[in-house]
Amino acid sequence: MNILAFTFLSLALLLGTVFAQPRVINEEELSSMNGAGGEGDVWLSVLGKVYDVTEGRRFYGEGGSYSVFGAKDNTANFATGKFDDPEVDFANLSEKHLSGLRHWTQFYKNNENYKQIGVLGNGIFYDTRGIATELHVSIERLLAKNQADSGADEF
């Protein structure tokens, strides 16, 4: 991918977040969406994008095999492949971390059962207004480069 493509992607990401204001979800609201008692919605976040995964309640809801991912941001988990809360330096992601993160961002983005419903406005990947942070934009650039370098079809 050339510099023009990176510049276009960066501009598109920035303009998209400025003009199309997403629903901003705070950590308190996200943490309450765990499907406790087999009822209610189940949400999760990756790279600050919040997805409604209620259709997969048996996996992500209380007692499910992936319940550890429900009701929180899982960027570090998906980058490392670890279920605990791993420490990740998002400013210096390895190729392995980028590949893992790319896989899971594509999975949620392309899964017809899981819809993005907003962004997590905690200041890490999106601010409280729903605007992508510099960190988010730089990671998206790295993911696009990782995509191009791997020869994979879509990001």
Image: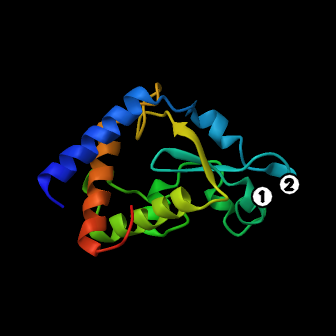
Left/right placement of residue 89 relative to residue 43 reads left
Q: Is residue 3 among what the camera can see?
A: yes
User: Which image quadrant is residue 10 in?
Assistant: top left
Q: Which residue is mark 2?
A: 38
Q: Residue furthest left?
A: 3
Alpha-carbon neighbours of circle 1 within 10 Å: few (<14), some, or many (≥20)? some
Circle on res. 79: none
| Residue 149 x %, y % | 23, 70
| Residue closest to the eye, 142 or 111 | 111
User: Which image quadrant is residue 8 in?
Assistant: top left
Q: Which residue is mark 1?
A: 62
- Amino acid under label 1? Glu
Q: Is residue 132 among what the camera can see?
A: no
| Residue 38 x %, y % | 85, 54
- Amino acid under label 2? Gly
Q: Are the residues at dot 1 and dot 2 in contact (C-beta closer than 8 Å)?
A: yes
Residue at x-position 52% and y-position 56%:
109
In the displayed structure, 71 sits above or below 93; it is: above
